[in-house]
Amino acid sequence: MEKYSFSSENQLPLFSERFPENRRGQPTPEQYEALARVRLSKHYILRDFLFSTECAARGLSNYPEDPDMVIRAGKALCEKVLEPIRERWGHLITTFGYQSREGIEWGWSKARRESNRHSSSPHMWDRKCWGEAIYARCDILPICVEDGEVSKHEFGRWLMHNLDLDLCMMWRRSNVFCLTISPRPRRVWVLWGNPQIGEPKQEMLMGATYWREVYPYLSEDQRPKFGPSCTGGRMQWRD
């Protein structure tokens, strides 16, 4: 067993019938440091993704249940998403990476947990919604967008046309992009707004209409590098 891994008798499988608030013991500082220093790619180590504001504020551990799977997920995000963005657009800031089960389910009642038993929660890279396949998400703040060098929509369009993304989410009043990879990519690009101030709640920039009515009629050089969508552009995998 690697020095950053540890086992715990109270660690439970996904969607267990019991929901203790803390599913495992605390790692030692040495274990946490060894895990945090794992190299993921040319520019990133795991420490870049392990800080969770919510966990820190609530005194919760953000140590993974399956460190080896989290390392694999981090490497996949770097290879498929972050390093290509950095090579094309320059510096970006990771605003939200991995979050543990404790952080995601903090304060949930048993009833809410039962009603959300199949919640995907892709910020928990080791939740194993797809078994051992990688389903992971991170939020980034691209400096090129923040500094006005390129518009959010131009940047988002480049993402969807050049990267192997499952889902790209952005917000009208933020320059943060939420990017997901999965074994069955939906290839959906969505813009979220605030209806309370008159904004549309959701605007599909690349969804079912695009994949059904636009994509088939594009020439090869106009099509996204990765496609088509595994769901026909729908947000849900299930019918």
Image (cartoon, grey):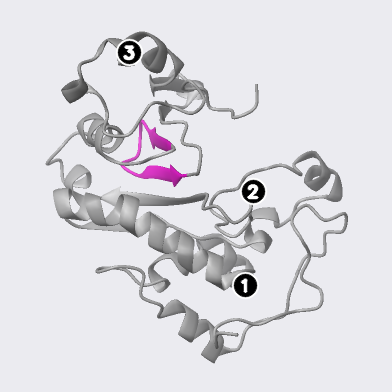
- Would you say residue 51 is visible in this rendering? no
Residue behind mark 1: 61
Element assignment for label 1: loop
Any mark on residue 216, and which? 3
The numbered mark, 1 or 2, whose residue comes first in the sequence reads 1
The numbered mark, 3 or 1, whose residue comes first in the sequence reads 1
Secondary structure that dominates the magenta span: strand
Element assignment for label 3: helix
* Position of 186 relative to 110 (above/below): above
Element assignment for label 2: loop
* Position of 180 relative to 227 (above/below): below
Q: Residues within 10 Å of mark 1 (few under 14, many from 20)?
A: many
**Image position, residue 142 (x, y; %):** 25, 49
Closer to us: 103 or 181: 181
Q: Nearer the viewer, mark 1 or mark 2?
A: 2
Q: Residues within 10 Å of mark 2 (few under 14, many from 20)?
A: some
Give amino acid for label 2: Cys
Q: Is residue 158 left or right of residue 238?
A: left
Q: Quadrant of the C terminus?
A: top right
Magenta-tinted stretch: 167-181
Residue behind mark 2: 129
Closer to us: 60 or 211: 211
